Amino acid sequence: MNDETNVTPVEPPNDQRQLRFCEVYLSSTHRDPVKCIQEVYPELSLEQARGKAGQFMRPQHKAGRYIHDVIRRMHQDLLPSMRVTEGSVIAQVARLAFSNVKRLYDDDGRMLTPDELDYDTAAAVTEVTERVLKANEMETVVERKYKLAEKGKHLEMLGRYMQLFVDKNETNLNIVSGEMLDLISKGNDEDSPIPK
């Protein structure tokens, strides 16, 4: 009897392309298993690629069990080597949430070049566009545009992490607990289901 939470690792098959699929899947930005199958198994038709992707993504299937185990181990090995921790993720979200457009300029109002930006400001820049407007032996005039990460989205993420924003179906027990304790202590013994 197999318990899905306690699946024993499967011995790797002879097909090295399954391991390659895991690498492609983890490094892809789209995380589309069919596209990853097509990259690793170019000889397959779209329908065959869909079938193989279905096998690979189903832990109940022998190949799927192996794929899931390898991907889990790759994650365990990869994240610490990249120094990805809860703290580093929150720090990056905070950089984006508190980015300030004023940091793109020096004290004289000149826009800084990308290599002059401080680390936090550079982390918040998602796109840089440069266009030469005038170039001669005397001077070069460059128009530079920076696109910054969306502050509102990252502020919301940070606020949710810190539990500053509570949905209707959520309850912030820290806020409610003081009020509830007052109500409980004032309740009368006869009709209160909560003992004093």
Image (cartoon, helix red, strand yellow):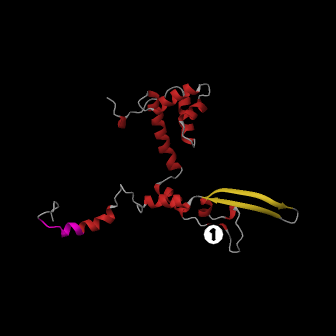
x%, y% of residue 179? 27, 68
Residue annotated with mark 1: 102
Q: Quadrant of residue 171?
A: bottom left
Answer yes or no: is residue 20 visible: no
Q: Residue furthest left?
A: 190
Closest to the observer: 169 or 54? 169
x%, y% of residue 31? 54, 40
Secondary structure of the residue carrying numbered label 1: helix
Residue occupying image coordinates x 48% and y 30%: 54
Residue occupying image coordinates x 50% and y 56%: 89
Closest to the observer: 151 or 4? 151
Specify whether residue 188 is painted magenta: yes
Q: In the image, which residues are magenta?
A: 182-189
Specify whether residue 117 is painted magenta: no
Left or right, 176 with respect to 118, comes to left
Closest to the observer: 65 or 179? 179
Residue occupying image coordinates x 25% and y 65%: 180
Residue occupying image coordinates x 59% and y 31%: 38
x%, y% of residue 168? 37, 57
